[in-house]
Amino acid sequence: MDDKNYSFDEGHDHNKPADVWFQDTQEGKALFIVFYSQACRWSRCIGCNLPSLMSERHVDFESLMAQVDHIISMPEVAASRAELRKVIVSNNGSVLDEATFSSTALMYLVARLNQSLPNLSVLSLETRPEYVDIPELEFLARALKEGACHTNLEIAIGFEAFDERIRNDMFKKGLSLKVFEKTAALLAEHRFALKCYFMLKPTPGLTDEEAVGDIHAAIDYLGVVGASMGLPINMHLNPTYVARGTALERSFDKGEFSPPRLRDLARAAFHAKGKGVSIYLGLSDEGLACEGGSFVRKGEEAMTRELERFNRTGDFAVLENIINGA
Ligand code: SF4
């Protein structure tokens, strides 16, 4: 673990997920699951303290299967069964890394989703690209076809920043364009979809203009990659919050970093209009921001609600109004 001083959540009940919440997306109601497992084995990205919600030690497949049962039996999930169109599966790392997330538990999850969610149209799996294994995905996709409705598989990859220097030298993502394009081509060939997580202003030393410009460049790039490969790509754009226990928090304390403005988030996302890349705006800091380190400033709650409306509708006029201060 580079330059981080958080601890792991060793006291968590192994039979319960780390977190579960609902999202309203253009695809319909979505369930976001964060399983409690062994932490991300990369754990180097500078602004990330997601591993702090995980275990330092291995969590066995029986516990992960118990977490699946727990989620399916939650009253709010049971009440939304028919409405749920999308499930996003995370372990704050890579659910396709079998060293941290059991393959047995992944198969069990697919079986329980097939049994329980009759209208599921997308299953999204978060992972680093090095764990993408096409025979495994084909097997999961085949199993998903046995559900009551057709369910597409989407692979969600953390990209974070388009600029190579920001992404790898500063943020320490460890992702080259070559690896990304190879993964995208494999997904396209097998007709899976791709989601890419990006962060607006992920590191200190970036002006707000440079941060917005990086997302514009990313949208242009993803538009070209998606069109050339016939691959549906969604950008999940998170404004950066100051995560506790990271190098970013120390920069924030020294006055070297301030979180991005929501208006700049709207400016960054507006660039996707007509580019063939769908956008979802991440508007939660998952309770991991330090004091004063969130991107939602006092008095901006109404703007947050408007951005949530954009997530539901995909209506770029909502962003235009925010940009123009309407
Ligand atoms: S951003 Fe993802 S890959 Fe990087 S340390 Fe955090 S969980 Fe691991």
Image (tube, helix red, strand yellow):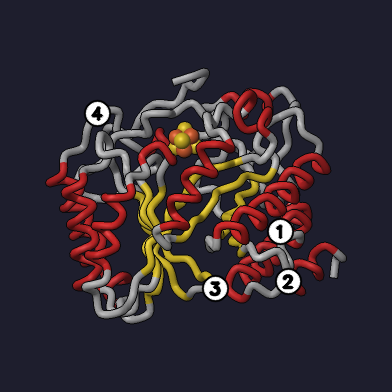
Query: Which quarter of the rendered picture does the N terminus lie within?
Result: top left
- The mark lying in front, picked from 4 and 2, is 2
Q: Residue 242 appears in which quarter of the rendering?
A: top right
Residue behind label 4 places its C-beta within 8 angstroms of ligand 1: no
At label 4, the amino acid type is Arg
Q: Which numbered disc flags the more N-terminal residue, 3 or 1?
A: 3
- What's under tag 1, amino acid-wise? Ala
What is the number of the mark on residue 282? none
The x and y percentages for residue 175 are 53, 33
Near mark 4 (Cα within 10 A), the count class, few <14, some 14-19 or many ≥20, is: few
Mark with earlier residue (1, 2) = 1
Q: CA distance from mark 3 to mark 4?
A: 37 Å
User: Dividing the image into 4 quarters, which one contains the C terminus?
Assistant: bottom right
Residue 316 in picture, x, y percent from top left:
73, 71
Tag 4 residue: 57
Residue hosting label 2: 316
Look at the numbered disc 4 and give the secondary structure of its residue.
Answer: loop
* Front in this rendered view, residue 47 or 198: 198
> For the residue carrying disc 3, how many other residues have a C-alpha within 10 Å: few (<14), some (14-19), or many (20+)?
some
> What residue is at 49 percent from the left and 43 percent from the top?
182
Q: Quadrant of residue 20?
A: bottom left
Q: Give the SS element for disc 3.
A: loop
Residue 26 got which mark?
A: 3
Image coordinates of residue 89 in percent, x first then y, are: 36, 54
**Residue at coordinates 64% horizontally, 72% vertically from top-left?**
314
